[in-house]
Each structure stands twice: as structure tokens, then as C-alpha cells.
Image (tube, helix red, strand yellow):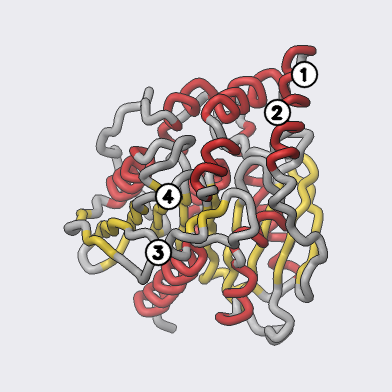
């Protein structure tokens, strides 16, 4: 059975719209009987779908766990630090935010980012959403009116600061990436703390400035926007953005990829170049478009042909993965590394 077929069933539109409308409103304000019944039913069906997608829970050497406290509450995180890294040498870090129905270890297994960390010498931080805050493990990136989204962004920064206090992190070489709800949360965190990140990666997510409520989130996921796209009043100094979006995504409409790229480019007054078709071996092809400010790359969009709501090029044994797609994890690191080098060149010692 095709990976896309598995993903389409596993992450149906009804499941996600119910997650946003019921999980965001009813659960956080004290779930009623009907909502609890819906959650139990949804989680049971998800557990059944996962039987063939079991991951190893044995942490690999270099995997550490931590707990942080912030105004958002207590949060756990996973941290992978390759054993061969010198203890006192400041190293780059990539912050990885999981999607719904995932946790830190799930996301590390799906993306195989730790393998790249061993090869290229960087650390990977995996903040984890609290299931008491969202029973399906989704980041509440859309709940801005009550301030919850901002508090969750601050909780991610608390995890980053906690890890940096324990290990030598090069603060000039930090990137943040996420999938689905994690992608939106990554962008929101970078918008609130732009000076802390050099690069941002959104994989299959909604640009957070398009949304200010759960209803708007559902509409945006379906490609309907309640906030119009208009030129920003001032230029913002934001980290560079990479967007990865599948054109067959049944959960987050492909329109969101271009929309996110255009919004981020508008903040910097970046101009697009012509799209180019990229084919790497037998993997899915993708259209790649860059936006520049002068000679400086500000935004890149990879629109992947044939990709659904799945991590492109992810581990074949994992849920939310399509191994036939181009390797998104390598794209994340290549983009981050390019931005790290650009910053060094523009700010020499």
C-alpha cells in the first residue's frame, strides 16, 4: 500500500479539524463528556493505525532528557549531543518541533536528524508538547488571543536556554524547524525571538500570522485565509526561511507553502527568482524558488510533487513519513549551514 494512502487515512481532514476545534477550545477549558468521548475514540483509532509503525524506545548514546519550567508550565525535551563532540567546544544547534500525535523521540526517529548531527557535528533539541495542554500533542500555535501561543513559544526558548546552560551551544548558529503544527510553532517562535535564530524551516505548516483563532486555523489549513496578504508597514530583520510543502497534502493545503514564503519575503522586501525543477535520482521532483535581498538569500520554497502530509524522505518504518520524497532532513541542515556561513561572512571577527 502506498505511503501516501496510509498518510491520507491516518491524518484525515475530519481528524484535524476536530483536533483544532474540539482540542483547542473544549479540552483546554475543561473537556465535556462529548469531547472526551471523541478524544477516546480518535486516540483508539490512531493507536490501531500505529501498530505497524512501532519505533524503538531505546535511547541512543548521546540522547539526554530534560525538564523546564516557564509560564506555560512544565515541559520535557529531548537532546541529542553526538558523543564525539568536544565537551567545551561551542557547536551549532537545530531545534526540531514535532507535529500532532508525536513526541520528541518519535520525531527524532522519523527525521533521522541525529544521524546527520553525528556526521556534521551539531546538537539537536526536541522540545515536547505537554499532553495535558493538548491531548493530541499539538502545539497551540493558533491560540494568540489568550496568549497561549506566545507562552508556548517562550517554553521552547526555555528549553533552548536550559540546554545551552548545560552544553556549549554556539548562539550564532541556531536553527529551528518543525513539521505541521510544529512548523507553524517554529515560525511563530522565530517571529517572537528573531535574534535567537539564523534559519527557520517550515515543513507542511501554516504561516502563523495568517491565523488568530482555531476557526481561522482550520480555514487556513484548507487554503482559505481570513487575514489578507498585504505589504508589511516596516521591514523586519527575520531569520532566513525554508518552506517544504507537498502538492498532494490532504491536511495542509499546498497553497500554504507559497503563502508562507511570500509573507516572509514581504517582511524583508525580498524579490523572487524563477522557479526551477529539481530531480534527484528516483525521488519525487520539486520546484524550488528563491527570494533574495540583493545577493542575500532570504526565503526558499521547495514544492514537492507527489508528497502528502508526511516528512519528505523520512524513515520508512515511521508514521508521517514518505521515504520517496527528497531528504527533508538534509535540506534542513544544508539550509541552516548555508545561513550560518553567510552570517560569519557578513559579520567577520
**Crowdedness of circle 1 by 10 Å Cα count: few (<14), some, many (20+)?**
few
Q: Nearer the viewer, residue 34 or 144?
A: 34
Which numbered dot is residue 283? 3
Residue 307, image x and y in percent?
42, 50
**Direction from residue 229 to residue 60 in the image, left or right:** right
Mark earlier in primary sequence (1, 2): 1
Q: Can residue 192 be seen in this snapshot? A: no
For mark 1, give the secondary structure: helix
**Crowdedness of circle 3 by 10 Å Cα count: few (<14), some, many (20+)?**
some
User: Which residue position is annotated with label 1?
Assistant: 37
Foreground tag (1 vs 4) = 4
The answer to whether marks 4 and 3 mark residues whose Cβ atoms lie closer than 8 Å is no
User: Could you tell me how far apart the alpha carbons at marks 3 and 2 are, in whole angstroms?
Assistant: 33 Å
User: Could you tell me how far apart the alpha carbons at marks 4 and 3 are, in whole angstroms?
Assistant: 10 Å
Mark earlier in primary sequence (3, 2): 2
The answer to whether marks 1 and 2 mark residues whose Cβ atoms lie closer than 8 Å is no
Name above or below for residue 141 compared with residue 123. above
**Direction from residue 253 to residue 230 in the image, left or right:** left
Name above or below for residue 297 compared with residue 272. below
Residue 312, image x and y in percent?
48, 57
The answer to whether marks 1 and 4 mark residues whose Cβ atoms lie closer than 8 Å is no
* Residue at point 70%, 74% (across, down): 81
* Residue at point 61%, 35% (across, down): 140
**Direction from residue 255 to residue 47 in the image, left or right:** right
Name above or below for residue 316 compared with residue 52. below
User: Which residue position is annotated with label 2?
Assistant: 42
The residue at the far front in this view is 1
User: Which residue position is annotated with label 4?
Assistant: 307
Which numbered dot is residue 214? none
Amino acid at each position: 500500500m502506498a505511503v501516501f494512502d496510509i498518510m491520507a487515512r491516518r491524518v484525515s481532514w475530519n481528524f484535524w479539524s476536530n483536533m483544532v476545534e474540539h482540542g483547542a477550545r473544549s479540552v483546554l477549558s475543561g473537556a465535556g463528556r462529548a469531547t472526551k468521548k471523541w478524544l477516546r475514540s480518535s486516540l483508539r483509532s490512531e493507536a490501531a493505525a500505529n501498530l505497524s509503525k512501532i519505533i524503538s524506545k531505546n535511547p541512543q548514546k548521546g540522547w539526554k532528557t530534560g525538564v523546564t519550567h516557564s509560564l506555560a508550565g512544565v515541559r520535557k525535551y529531548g537532546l541529542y549531543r553526538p558523543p564525539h563532540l568536544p565537551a567545551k567546544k561551542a557547536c551549532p544547534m537545530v531545534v526540531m518541533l514535532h507535529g500532532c500525535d508525536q513526541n520528541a523521540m518519535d520525531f527524532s526517529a522519523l527525521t533521522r536528524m541525529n544521524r546527520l548531527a553525528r556526521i556534521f557535528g551539531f546538537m539537536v533539541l526536541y522540545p515536547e508538547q505537554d499532553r495535558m495542554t493538548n491531548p493530541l500533542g499539538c502545539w497551540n500555535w493558533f491560540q494568540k488571543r489568550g496568549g497561549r501561543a506566545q507562552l508556548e513559544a517562550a517554553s521552547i526558548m526555555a528549553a533552548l536556554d536550559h540546554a545551552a546552560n548545560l552544553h556549549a551551544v554556539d548562539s550564532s548558529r541556531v536553527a529551528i524547524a518543525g513539521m505541521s503544527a510544529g512548523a507553524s510553532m517554529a515560525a511563530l517562535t522565530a517571529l517572537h525571538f528573531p535574534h535567537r535564530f539564523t534559519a527557520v524551516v517550515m515543513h507542511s505548516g501554516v504561516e502563523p500570522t495568517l491565523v488568530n483563532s482555531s476557526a481561522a486555523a482550520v480555514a487556513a489549513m484548507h487554503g482559505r485565509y481570513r487575514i489578507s496578504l498585504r505589504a508589511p508597514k516596516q521591514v523586519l530583520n527575520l531569520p532566513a526561511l525554508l518552506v517544504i510543502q507537498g502538492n498532494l497534502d490532504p491536511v495542509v493545503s499546498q497553497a500554504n507553502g507559497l503563502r508562507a514564503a511570500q509573507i516572509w519575503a514581504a517582511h524583508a522586501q525580498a524579490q523572487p527568482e524563477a522557479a526551477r525543477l529539481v530531480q534527484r535520482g528516483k525521488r519525487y521532483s520539486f520546484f524550488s524558488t528563491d527570494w533574495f535581498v540583493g545577493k542575500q538569500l532570504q526565503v526558499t520554497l521547495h514544492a514537492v510533487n507527489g508528497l502528502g502530509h508526511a516528512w519528505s524522505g523520512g524513515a520508512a518504518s515511521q508514521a508521517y513519513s514518505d521515504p520517496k520524497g527528497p531528504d527533508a532532513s538534509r535540506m534542513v541542515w544544508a539550509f541552516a549551514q548555508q545561513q550560518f556561513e553567510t552570517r560569519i561572512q557578513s559579520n567577520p571577527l
